[in-house]
Protein backbone atom coordinates (compact mmCIF):
# COMPACT_ATOMS: atom_id res chain seq x y z
CA UNK A 1 0.00 0.00 0.00
CA UNK A 2 1.39 3.37 -1.00
CA UNK A 3 1.17 6.41 1.25
CA UNK A 4 0.65 9.97 0.08
CA UNK A 5 3.49 12.18 1.28
CA UNK A 6 3.32 15.93 0.95
CA UNK A 7 6.68 17.53 0.18
CA UNK A 8 6.31 21.08 1.46
CA UNK A 9 7.87 22.92 -1.46
CA UNK A 10 6.99 24.59 -4.74
CA UNK A 11 10.62 24.29 -5.87
CA UNK A 12 10.55 21.87 -8.82
CA UNK A 13 14.29 21.19 -8.58
CA UNK A 14 13.98 20.19 -4.94
CA UNK A 15 10.93 18.00 -5.69
CA UNK A 16 12.86 16.16 -8.43
CA UNK A 17 15.66 15.47 -5.94
CA UNK A 18 13.18 13.97 -3.49
CA UNK A 19 11.61 11.88 -6.22
CA UNK A 20 15.03 10.37 -6.91
CA UNK A 21 16.06 10.06 -3.24
CA UNK A 22 12.77 8.37 -2.23
CA UNK A 23 12.52 6.12 -5.29
CA UNK A 24 11.58 2.59 -4.30
CA UNK A 25 9.69 3.55 -1.15
CA UNK A 26 5.93 2.86 -0.95
CA UNK A 27 5.08 6.52 -1.32
CA UNK A 28 3.41 8.91 -3.75
CA UNK A 29 4.90 12.39 -3.54
CA UNK A 30 2.79 15.52 -3.75
CA UNK A 31 4.11 19.07 -3.75
CA UNK A 32 2.29 22.14 -2.50
CA UNK A 33 1.52 22.93 -6.15
CA UNK A 34 -0.34 19.59 -6.45
CA UNK A 35 -2.86 20.33 -3.71
CA UNK A 36 -6.46 20.75 -4.94
CA UNK A 37 -6.74 23.96 -2.92
CA UNK A 38 -4.03 26.45 -2.14
CA UNK A 39 -2.90 26.53 1.48
CA UNK A 40 -1.50 29.61 3.22
CA UNK A 41 2.26 29.90 2.95
CA UNK A 42 4.10 29.20 6.18
CA UNK A 43 6.54 31.94 7.18
CA UNK A 44 10.04 30.67 7.99
CA UNK A 45 10.47 32.59 11.23
CA UNK A 46 12.80 30.12 12.96
CA UNK A 47 16.38 31.02 13.80
CA UNK A 48 17.76 27.57 12.87
CA UNK A 49 17.32 25.19 9.94
CA UNK A 50 15.70 22.62 12.25
CA UNK A 51 13.21 25.14 13.64
CA UNK A 52 12.10 26.17 10.15
CA UNK A 53 11.84 22.59 8.89
CA UNK A 54 9.67 21.59 11.87
CA UNK A 55 7.59 24.75 11.58
CA UNK A 56 6.74 24.00 7.95
CA UNK A 57 6.20 20.26 8.42
CA UNK A 58 3.80 20.73 11.36
CA UNK A 59 1.90 23.62 9.77
CA UNK A 60 1.35 22.03 6.35
CA UNK A 61 0.47 18.68 7.92
CA UNK A 62 -2.09 20.39 10.15
CA UNK A 63 -3.56 22.27 7.18
CA UNK A 64 -3.85 19.23 4.91
CA UNK A 65 -4.07 16.19 7.19
CA UNK A 66 -1.28 14.60 5.15
CA UNK A 67 1.98 13.08 6.25
CA UNK A 68 4.35 15.92 5.44
CA UNK A 69 8.06 16.23 4.70
CA UNK A 70 9.65 19.67 4.88
CA UNK A 71 13.23 20.79 4.85
CA UNK A 72 15.13 23.94 5.47
CA UNK A 73 18.50 24.22 3.86
CA UNK A 74 21.05 26.89 3.18
CA UNK A 75 24.60 27.94 2.67
CA UNK A 76 26.95 29.03 5.45
CA UNK A 77 30.09 30.91 4.38
CA UNK A 78 32.83 31.22 6.99
CA UNK A 79 34.27 34.48 5.64
CA UNK A 80 30.78 36.04 5.96
CA UNK A 81 30.37 34.91 9.59
CA UNK A 82 28.09 32.08 8.52
CA UNK A 83 25.82 34.12 6.26
CA UNK A 84 23.49 33.76 4.42
CA UNK A 85 22.49 30.74 6.60
CA UNK A 86 18.70 30.51 7.24
CA UNK A 87 18.24 33.55 5.01
CA UNK A 88 19.78 31.79 1.98
CA UNK A 89 16.55 31.67 -0.03
CA UNK A 90 15.83 35.35 0.73
CA UNK A 91 19.38 36.67 0.16
CA UNK A 92 18.26 38.19 -3.16
CA UNK A 93 15.15 37.87 -5.39
CA UNK A 94 16.48 35.20 -7.83
CA UNK A 95 19.04 32.40 -7.79
CA UNK A 96 21.25 34.30 -10.24
CA UNK A 97 21.04 37.44 -8.10
CA UNK A 98 21.83 35.48 -4.94
CA UNK A 99 24.92 33.95 -6.52
CA UNK A 100 26.08 37.31 -7.88
CA UNK A 101 25.56 38.99 -4.50
CA UNK A 102 27.52 36.27 -2.71
CA UNK A 103 30.42 36.42 -5.19
CA UNK A 104 30.50 40.20 -4.84
CA UNK A 105 30.58 39.91 -1.04
CA UNK A 106 33.62 37.60 -1.33
CA UNK A 107 35.49 39.71 -3.87
CA UNK A 108 39.19 39.74 -2.94
CA UNK A 109 38.85 36.87 -0.46
CA UNK A 110 41.49 34.20 -1.24
CA UNK A 111 40.53 30.60 -1.93
CA UNK A 112 41.69 29.23 1.42
CA UNK A 113 39.30 31.57 3.23
CA UNK A 114 36.29 30.78 1.01
CA UNK A 115 35.29 27.68 3.01
CA UNK A 116 31.58 27.00 3.18
CA UNK A 117 29.03 24.30 3.78
CA UNK A 118 25.53 23.40 2.67
CA UNK A 119 23.29 22.33 5.56
CA UNK A 120 19.90 20.64 5.26
CA UNK A 121 17.52 19.58 8.01
CA UNK A 122 14.64 17.34 6.92
CA UNK A 123 11.57 17.01 9.13
CA UNK A 124 8.70 14.54 8.68
CA UNK A 125 5.40 14.82 10.54
CA UNK A 126 2.86 12.01 10.57
CA UNK A 127 -0.56 13.13 11.86
CA UNK A 128 -2.20 10.48 14.04
CA UNK A 129 -5.56 10.46 15.82
CA UNK A 130 -3.80 10.96 19.17
CA UNK A 131 -1.26 13.55 18.10
CA UNK A 132 1.64 13.64 15.65
CA UNK A 133 4.84 11.65 15.19
CA UNK A 134 7.85 13.76 14.26
CA UNK A 135 11.36 12.95 13.08
CA UNK A 136 14.29 15.09 11.89
CA UNK A 137 17.78 14.57 10.46
CA UNK A 138 20.61 16.85 9.35
CA UNK A 139 23.06 16.53 6.46
CA UNK A 140 26.11 18.65 5.56
CA UNK A 141 28.29 19.13 2.49
CA UNK A 142 31.64 20.88 2.95
CA UNK A 143 33.39 22.84 0.21
CA UNK A 144 34.50 26.29 -0.98
CA UNK A 145 32.85 29.16 -2.81
CA UNK A 146 34.17 29.35 -6.37
CA UNK A 147 35.34 32.59 -7.99
CA UNK A 148 32.68 32.33 -10.70
CA UNK A 149 29.59 30.28 -11.50
CA UNK A 150 30.02 27.03 -13.47
CA UNK A 151 27.71 24.22 -14.50
CA UNK A 152 24.14 23.83 -15.70
CA UNK A 153 22.73 21.18 -13.35
CA UNK A 154 21.14 21.60 -9.96
CA UNK A 155 19.67 24.84 -8.66
CA UNK A 156 20.24 27.59 -6.11
CA UNK A 157 23.86 28.07 -5.06
CA UNK A 158 25.04 24.88 -6.81
CA UNK A 159 26.95 26.75 -9.61
CA UNK A 160 29.22 28.53 -7.11
CA UNK A 161 29.75 25.73 -4.56
CA UNK A 162 33.07 24.03 -5.23
CA UNK A 163 33.74 20.43 -4.17
CA UNK A 164 37.16 18.96 -3.25
CA UNK A 165 37.43 17.35 -6.71
CA UNK A 166 37.39 20.79 -8.37
CA UNK A 167 33.86 20.63 -9.76
CA UNK A 168 30.93 22.75 -8.68
CA UNK A 169 27.77 20.98 -7.56
CA UNK A 170 26.13 22.26 -10.77
CA UNK A 171 28.69 20.26 -12.77
CA UNK A 172 27.59 16.96 -11.20
CA UNK A 173 25.02 14.67 -12.74
CA UNK A 174 21.81 14.35 -10.69
CA UNK A 175 22.93 10.91 -9.48
CA UNK A 176 26.36 12.22 -8.44
CA UNK A 177 24.75 15.08 -6.56
CA UNK A 178 22.35 12.75 -4.73
CA UNK A 179 25.31 10.67 -3.49
CA UNK A 180 27.07 13.60 -1.81
CA UNK A 181 24.47 16.30 -1.21
CA UNK A 182 23.44 17.66 2.17
CA UNK A 183 19.84 16.73 1.35
CA UNK A 184 20.82 13.19 0.36
CA UNK A 185 22.81 12.73 3.57
CA UNK A 186 19.95 14.00 5.73
CA UNK A 187 17.46 11.72 4.01
CA UNK A 188 19.78 8.70 4.31
CA UNK A 189 19.82 9.22 8.08
CA UNK A 190 16.06 9.66 8.15
CA UNK A 191 15.09 6.71 5.94
CA UNK A 192 14.80 4.02 8.63
CA UNK A 193 12.43 6.17 10.69
CA UNK A 194 10.63 7.31 7.56
CA UNK A 195 9.92 3.68 6.64
CA UNK A 196 8.50 3.09 10.12
CA UNK A 197 6.31 6.17 9.78
CA UNK A 198 5.10 5.07 6.34
CA UNK A 199 4.11 1.69 7.77
CA UNK A 200 2.26 3.39 10.63
CA UNK A 201 0.52 5.70 8.20
CA UNK A 202 -0.61 2.79 6.05
CA UNK A 203 -2.04 1.04 9.11
CA UNK A 204 -3.65 4.04 10.77
CA UNK A 205 -7.09 5.49 10.28
CA UNK A 206 -7.06 8.77 8.37
CA UNK A 207 -7.03 11.72 10.81
CA UNK A 208 -9.89 13.22 8.82
CA UNK A 209 -12.17 10.31 9.63
Image (tube, grey):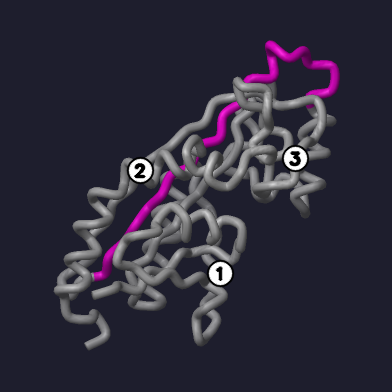
Looking at the rendered image, the quarter that the C terminus falls into is bottom left
Where residue 96 appears, as percent x and y from the top left, is 80, 47
Where residue 141 appears, as percent x and y from the top left, is 52, 31
Seen at 34% across and 57% down, the residue is: 124
Where residue 138 appears, as percent x and y from the top left, is 40, 39
Which residue carries the number 3 mark? 151
Seen at 58% across and 47% down, the residue is: 174
Residue closest to the eye, 91 or 159: 159
Tell me if mark 1 has few (under 14), some (14-19) or many (20+) residues whose alpha carbon lies within 10 angstroms of its own.
few
In the image, is residue 27 above or below residue 102? below
Give the mark toward the camera: 3 or 1. 3
- The answer to whether one can see residue 78 in this image is no
Tag 3's secondary structure?
loop
Magenta-colored stretch includes residue 77:
no
Which residue carries the number 1 mark? 41
Tell me if mark 2 has few (under 14), some (14-19) or many (20+) residues whose alpha carbon lies within 10 angstroms of its own.
some
Count of numbered marks: 3
Magenta-colored stretch includes residue 111:
yes
Tag 1's secondary structure?
loop
Give the mark toward the camera: 1 or 2. 2
Q: Quote the CA–CA distance across marks 1 and 2.
A: 28 Å
The range drawn in magenta is 106-127
Residue closest to the eye, 70 or 150: 150
- Residue 188 has which mark? 2
Task: State the image quarter where residue 117 is shown.
Answer: top right
Amino acid sequence: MTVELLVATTNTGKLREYQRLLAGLPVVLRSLADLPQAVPEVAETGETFEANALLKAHAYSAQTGLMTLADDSGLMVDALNGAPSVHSARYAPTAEARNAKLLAALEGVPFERRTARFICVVAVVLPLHDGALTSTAEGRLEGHIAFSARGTHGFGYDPIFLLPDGRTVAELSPEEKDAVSHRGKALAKLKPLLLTMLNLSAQSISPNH
